[in-house]
């Protein structure tokens, strides 16, 4: 099984030390594309240079392309990265669910949202071993946790799990929108260059809805 989160030390930053800090600032969310040889970010500055697997570059297959998600702060500190999902799309819906729960988008944009009624949860993402990335709304901020199926059992030096890292609501929203904009920019290129005969595909509808949101929000 593929290694999930990574443990990165940069300068004096370590995950255990960062857990004790109150608020994550400068959050960046990157959706990741993965082929057989490497993993890369959906970064618009390098998107045209990415060597995509030709089999992924079709409207009917791009939605099932492999990939994952990454969180960074302070421009260089990666505190979560995982491609341990069946494909990239659950990471996309994880961000869409969070924006729906925060009432940034509505059912006209994303009608297949999950419901977390009666809980503080706004979105969750489960990888192949059952570990859960979860976002909760607490008062006026959000809290990010990465929970092990064994309830944060001590894993020694390689403990990738964390609880309740605080993120301002507006910071999460801005970062999620940027990541989704980058993803749907690539989706639209795929739809234009490698379209399928199915003009009503789920990916095409979702991309069109996101374009409407972007125009409405003047992004």
Image (cartoon, rainbow, N blue to C red):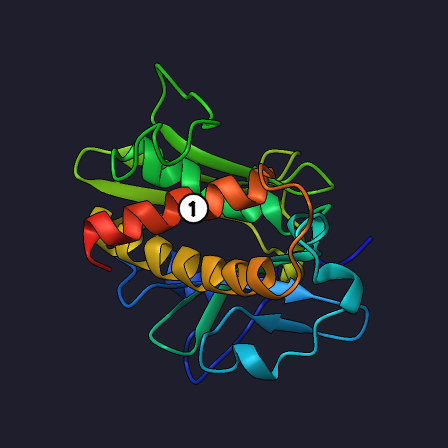
> Is 164 drawn above or below residue 2 in the view shown?
above
Q: How far across and how far down the image is residue 68, in percent?
A: 61, 56
Q: Is residue 147 left or right of residue 113?
A: right
Residue name at image x 34 percent, y 14 percent? 118
Q: How far across and how far down the image is residue 140, in percent?
A: 17, 39
Q: How far across and how far down the image is residue 198, in percent?
A: 66, 41
Describe the element under mark 1 as helix, strand or loop.
helix
Residue name at image x 66 percent, y 61 percent? 194
Q: Is residue 55 visible?
A: yes
Residue name at image x 44 percent, y 35 percent? 123
Residue name at image x 25 percent, y 39 percent? 104
- What residue occupies the far left of the structure in this picture? 140
- Crowding near the residue tagged with mark 1, few <14, some 14–19, many ≥20 C-alpha atoms within 10 Å: some
Q: Is residue 172 left or right of residue 196?
A: left
The residue nearer to you, when weighing 49 against 114, is 49
> Is 95 drawn above or below residue 83 in the view shown?
above
On-image quarter of the C terminus: bottom left
- The residue beneath circle 1 is 208
Q: How far across and how far down the image is residue 137, in percent?
A: 29, 34
């Amino acid at each position: 099984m593929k290694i999930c989160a990574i443990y990165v030390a940069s300068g004096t930053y370590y995950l255990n030390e960062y857990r004790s800090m109150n608020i994550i600032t400068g959050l960046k969310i990157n959706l990741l594309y993965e082929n057989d040889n490497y993993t890369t970010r959906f970064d618009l500055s390098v998107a045209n240079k990415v060597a995509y697997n030709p089999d992924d570059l079709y409207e009917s297959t791009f939605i099932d392309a492999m990939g994952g998600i990454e969180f960074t702060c302070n421009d260089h500190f990666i505190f979560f990265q995982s491609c341990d999902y069946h494909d990239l799309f659950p990471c996309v819906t994880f961000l869409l669910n969070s924006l729906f729960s925060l009432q940034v988008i509505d059912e006209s944009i994303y009608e297949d949202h999950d419901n977390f009624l009666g809980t503080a949860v706004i979105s969750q993402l489960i990888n192949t071993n059952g570990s859960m990335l979860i976002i909760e709304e607490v008062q006026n901020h959000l809290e990010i946790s990465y929970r092990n199926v064994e309830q944060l059992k001590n894993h020694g030096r390689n403990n990738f799990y964390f609880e309740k890292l605080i993120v301002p609501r507006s910071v999460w929203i801005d970062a999620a929108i940027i990541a989704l904009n980058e993803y749907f920019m690539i989706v639209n290129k795929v739809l234009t260059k490698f379209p399928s005969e199915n003009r009503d595909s789920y990916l095409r509808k979702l991309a069109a809805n996101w374009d409407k949101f972007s125009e409405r929000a003047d992004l």
